[in-house]
Every structure is written in C-alpha cells, then in structure tokens.
Amino acid sequence: MRAGFCPKCLLRQGGFRPDKFEPPTVAEISRRLGDRLEILEVIGHGGMGAVYKCRQTLLNRLVALKVIASRGRHDADLDSRLAREARLLARLDHPNIVKVHEFSQAGDLNYFVMDYVAGQNLRQLQRGQPASTEQLVAVAGQICDALQHAHEREVIHRDIKPENILIDGQGQVKIVDFGLARAYQAETGISRLTMAGQVMGTPHYMSPEQVEKPDTVDHRSDLYALGVVLYEWLTGELPLGRFEPPSARANIDSRWDALVMRALEKDVARRYQQARQIKDELGALKNNLRPTKQELPLAALDLPPALESNGSTKTETADGSNTAASTIRTSWALAVSYRQQGQFALSILEHQRLLRMLSESEPEHAKLIRDARHDMQGTMRMLETQHEIFRQSPAEYRYGEALKSSYIVLEMPDQRDDISRLLARAYVLKEKFPLAVTEYEEILRRYPADAEALKALAELKKRAS
C-alpha cells in the first residue's frame, strides 16, 4: 500500500477558481467574432471558459472554438500569458494532440480556434463497456506518444485527466486543453509562464510536487497524472490516501501493478523519466498478460527437460492435481520469453519469483533451482553486455533509458548511477539539452557535490543564455 496526499490540502493551495463563469451565448459570440465563424452550439464549459462547435465559413470545415474570459484586475496579466502560451502550443504538431490553428482576442475574451474532434472523452468511454487489454494499451500508448512529443519540445500539459483525452470514431486519441500548459526552462526545469508559487491543475490527478512545490514541476508530473488515469481506468477508483496496487482493488492481471505503481511514485527520480518508457512497458504487458489463459509458444522456448517433457515437475497435490507444477512451468516460460524479447529486468524478476517457488517445493527440484539460477545469471550478463555497449556508443540514448529503467526496477543503485551519467552525456551529444539537465539534476539530488554534474549544468546554463 502506498501513501498519497490529502485531497483536502489541495483546496488550501492557490490557483483554483471557485467563482462561476457564465459562457457567452451563441448569439453573443457570433456578434463579437463576425461571420467568418458560424457558431453552431456550446459543447462544454468550465470554471475558466467555454468550448463551441463552429464551422469556418471560408474553408467549410468544422472547428472548435475555446473562449477564455479575463476577470478584472486579479487577471491583469492573463491576456499576455495566454498569448505567450499560444505561441508555445504552436510548437506542437502531432496526430494525438488537438492542433491549435489560431489565437486572438475580442474585447475581454481570449479565444483559440482548434481542431474539432467528433467522439467521446475517456471518462465517457470508461462508463461504457469494460475496456479490453488491447484497447487500454492502444489508448495509453497514444497518450504516451503525445506526451513524448510535447515534452521533447519542453511543453508540460499539467492537467492530464480523462476529460482532456478524446477518442474519435477511429479510435485515435486526441489530447486537448493545454490551457494550463507551460514551458520549462532548459537550464533550470522551472516554468517561464506561471506565476511563482501558483498551483494549477485538477486535484486528484496532480502529482505531489505539483501541489507541494509548483515552481519545480517538470514533465514527469504529466507521467504521474497518466498513472492516475491508468489506475482509475483499471480499478474504477482514484489512488487516494494509502492506496493498494491495482490488482488488489480489481480482478486484473498483477503485471499491471509494477507499471502503474512506478508511474505513481512520489519520488520523481523513481518514477518513469520519459513517456516512451511507459509505452515500451505497455507493449511488453500486451504480449505477456495472463499467459496462463492461453497456450504459450513453449516449443520455441529453451526450457529444462524436466519441464519440457510433459509439463510436470512431479509435484502433485493430494487430490492428484498439478497446479504447482503448472505455475512453475508457466513462470519459467515467461522468464525465457521476457529474455528473448530483450526485457531483461522483467526476465530477472520472473526468475527470482521462480526461484522462490522452487525453493519452497520438494527437494527433488534442486537441479531445477541450479538451472534457474544459471539462466538468471545468463540474463544478468546480457544486461551487463548491453550496459557496456551503451558505454561505447553513448549516442544511442534510448538504450540508456531502457537500462536505467531496468536498474530502477531491479533496485541496483550503483549501476543506475553509472548509466545516469552516461545517459546525461548522451543527451548532450544528441542536443537533447532539457533531458540532460533533468538527468544531471537527478544526479545532484543524490550527490550534491558531484563535480561532473555541477560543471555540466553550469555549461548547459551558459549555452541556454
């Protein structure tokens, strides 16, 4: 069970707007904007604005119009901040992000013209039939693609939640409402657009640092929010207070637990560092969920003869069943399958589980224990070889990200620290400077006096200036 944070505390923070916003009528919007947009209907409104379905008359295409109202002297800087954020959003051009075509002002109204998506949001989808594994992985994978695109352009969404994730009729995801988005400085990871100390986002989906230290929020806050979305979709509950892994709250495969719980890590250093890492884990999950429900391709796996011959390890229960033996066989097959797919950390974890089961079984399994330990050591050597290859070819930073993820899962801090340094240098080589800054800052959180990290950060700040 993991501790979250108190929802009531969120409302004591700044940044939320309790006052009610009355959306302008269709007639009023039409009067203000003229005849270039035909306003068809209001399709939604909230505390800060409203969204309208429109038709661009010259192009004869449907678009969405989002209107945000200024509110007096307390929002004196809102217009200029929204204009800056509109320029920020112009950086984003991705099939899973709603495209913003225009930003302008009409009196006290600021408005965005963007793609219109005919479909439903994730909240509405969740209220329908239970999602299949394929659907869940497909939707989550597209969310990861969109976030990776935004984060590589130094844009943080800060309000990932089911209502801001649309799915069109073809099953394509479109992330909307970057109204809280911000850029973070490459040299410091700190917002350039948001006022100091201002908490922004939706309670329950906000990361701990978004509540406690809003000035320090970086792209990993979006990954935490995605973890909340996945937890809620899998269990029907929000991860509040001291929450249990998803499989303890719903009848789902326990292999979801590691992915979701890591996304929900309070410590950002232990959380996923890139959205693409979550997508990679989703791919592995899709291929390996609930293997006992279907026939594994055992003929292609290098299983010990004692398991390969008839699927039995001669450990029958009192009623003659072979449940324990079947579980051992499935675990071994899964460990080998993970290794063949290059998922070395998952293979090692499964081997460790296998060894525990074999150790608790009859003494006749001593040889299987030796074979399993030998297999696990072989997989560890593969991981070490991959590490050495990355050391020699540091420009291939995605290998480094996969290795770092493996070392975090396996709780190998020395190897993780070494790969962090190599990864930071790789990011610099590929001119991924914001990612390099994040990596060096993470090193300094563990080793505040680290000379290499301090020097590298100083050079990156100088480069940015």
Image (cartoon, rainbow, N blue to C red):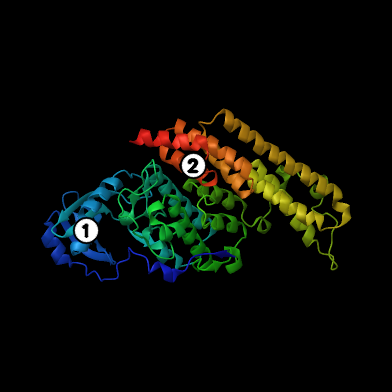
**Quadrant into which the C terminus falls:** top left
* Residue at the far right in the pictured view: 364
Question: Which of these two is toward me, 66 or 455?
Answer: 455
Residue 63 relative to residue 321: left or right = left
Residue kind at label 2, given as amino acid type: Glu
Q: Position of residue 210 (x, y in %)?
A: 41, 58
Question: Which of these two is toward me, 53 or 44?
Answer: 44
Q: Position of residue 291 (x, y in %)?
A: 66, 55
Q: Residues within 10 Å of mark 2 (few under 14, many from 20)?
A: many
Question: Which residue, given by chain and number where applicable, does mark 2 sit on?
Answer: 439
Give the spatial CA distance, label 2 vs label 1. 44 Å
Above/below status of 192 relative to 397: below
Q: Position of residue 189 (x, y in %)?
A: 40, 46
Residue 214 relative to residue 37: left or right = right
- Quarter holding residue 294: bottom right
The answer to which of marks 2 and 1 sits earlier in the sequence is: 1
Residue 142 relative to residue 26: left or right = right
Above/below status of 11 relative to 264: below
Question: Which of these two is toward me, 318 or 395?
Answer: 395
Please name the residue shown 62% across and 60% down the image.
Answer: 254
Q: Position of residue 340 (x, y in %)?
A: 66, 41
Is residue 66 visible in the rendered image? The answer is: yes
Q: Which mark is residue 54?
A: 1
Please name the residue shown 77% across and 46% down the image.
Answer: 372
Residue kind at label 1, given as amino acid type: Cys
SS of the residue at dot 1?
A: strand
Q: Residues within 10 Å of mark 1 (few under 14, many from 20)?
A: many
**Quadrant into which the N terminus falls:** bottom right
